[in-house]
Image: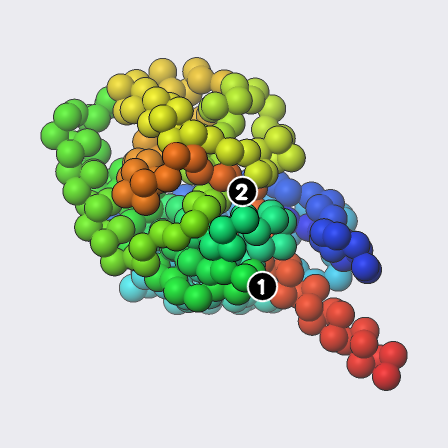
């Protein structure tokens, strides 16, 4: 995903999006089984990055950074991808699971008001990993962890039939619960972000053309969440693809990812989930904006 934003001096929020373009090359294809990046996945991802870089250059960005997460952390042959990308001269940052959690929390703290309880839990469901971070006043994270469960990883591990069988759903839930046991207990308001959560929100809204402004801050009742997700599990991939709000590129893996969201909400005992359109990419830009502010302040001094 390409995110380009301007820094608005003294503005609230201070980041004004210029472009937000989704590509889904699925770098983690078959990674859970082989522990290696598939050659086709490497080629697709490098091609997707090249297209995003060209878009960024047309917009004359000041600085361009490619950020890698779980697939590059976990793959035994990630150096093959990193070497190929380094040859292009593009700046790359592979972040840890802890960094991913912290940056996700930062993105929410900068965009959504803190709830009256003063406590918040942010859930980031990715393709290969899931992070949960708990924090309070001042928008600071206090406890967090990252586990190797995600939409692509669990789909490939647990689902063999279309639609999934009852036994496969049971295995999926068991794998999710085992992963969630390793995360901090959610506290206060539960905020979910990244593609799985925003897709569920888009399905709820019947949103043919995705609009992040309508999704960011949306409150979705747990009962409605359950209704949407269980319905996905009863449908074939082709049937899911007909639903308004569902990107065809997520049609196969959306059920596994959405079940992570549902099980987290159910285990937390919350009556609703807040959906955020932000995420790691926004957290990265917030840090870059910090750097720019310090540089400008230093120059003025």
**Would residue 112 be seen by someone viewing this image from the given angle?**
yes
Specify the farthest residue to the right.
Answer: 300
Quarter holding the C terminus? Answer: bottom right
Q: Which residue is mark 1?
A: 138
Q: Nearer the viewer, residue 64 or 191?
A: 191
> For this view, does 85 lie left or right of residue 168?
right
The residue lying at 25 percent from left, 58 percent from top is 182
The residue lying at 61 percent from left, 49 percent from top is 113
Image x and y of residue 173, in percent: 20, 38
Picture quadrant where residue 224 is located: top left
> For this view, does 199 lie left or right of residue 301?
left
For disc 2, the neighbor class at 10 Å (few under 14, some 14 to 19, many from 20) is: many
Image x and y of residue 40, in percent: 38, 46
The residue lying at 36 percent from left, 52 percent from top is 186
Badge number at residue 276 = 2
Could you tell me which secondary element the residue under label 1 belongs to?
helix
Could you tell me which secondary element the residue under label 2 belongs to?
loop
Specify the farthest residue to the front.
Answer: 116
Mark 2 or 1, nearer chain start: 1
The residue lying at 60 percent from left, 47 percent from top is 112
> For this view, does 38 lie left or right of residue 62?
left
For disc 1, the neighbor class at 10 Å (few under 14, some 14 to 19, many from 20) is: few
Specify the farthest residue to the bottom.
Answer: 301
């Amino acid at each position: 995903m390409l995110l380009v934003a301007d820094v608005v001096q003294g503005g609230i929020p201070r980041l004004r999006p210029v472009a937000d373009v989704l590509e889904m090359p699925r770098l983690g294809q078959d990674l859970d089984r082989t522990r290696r990046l598939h050659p086709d996945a490497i080629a697709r991802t490098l091609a997707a990055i090249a297209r995003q870089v060209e878009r960024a250059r047309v917009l004359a960005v000041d600085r361009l950074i490619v950020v890698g997460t779980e697939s590059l952390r976990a793959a035994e042959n990630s150096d093959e991808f990193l070497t190929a990308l380094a040859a292009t001269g593009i700046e790359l940052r592979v972040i840890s699971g802890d960094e991913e959690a912290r940056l996700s929390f930062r993105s929410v703290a900068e965009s959504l008001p803190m709830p009256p309880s003063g406590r918040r839990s942010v859930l980031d469901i990715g393709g290969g990993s899931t992070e949960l971070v708990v924090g309070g006043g001042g928008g600071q994270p206090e406890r967090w962890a990252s586990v190797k469960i995600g939409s692509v990883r669990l789909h490939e591990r647990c689902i063999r039939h279309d639609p999934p069988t009852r036994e496969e759903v049971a295995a999926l839930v068991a794998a999710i619960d085992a992963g969630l046991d390793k995360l901090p207990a959610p506290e206060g308001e539960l905020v979910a972000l990244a593609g799985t959560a925003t897709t569920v929100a888009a399905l709820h809204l019947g949103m043919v053309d995705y609009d992040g402004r309508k999704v960011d801050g949306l409150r979705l009742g747990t009962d409605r969440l359950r209704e949407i997700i269980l319905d996905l599990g009863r449908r074939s991939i082709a049937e899911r693809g007909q639903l308004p709000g569902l990107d065809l590129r997520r049609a196969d893996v959306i059920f596994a990812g959405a079940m992570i969201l549902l099980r987290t909400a159910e285990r937390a005992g919350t009556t609703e989930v807040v959906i955020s359109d932000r995420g790691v990419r926004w957290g990265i830009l917030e840090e870059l904006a910090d750097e720019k502010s310090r540089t400008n302040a230093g120059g003025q001094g």
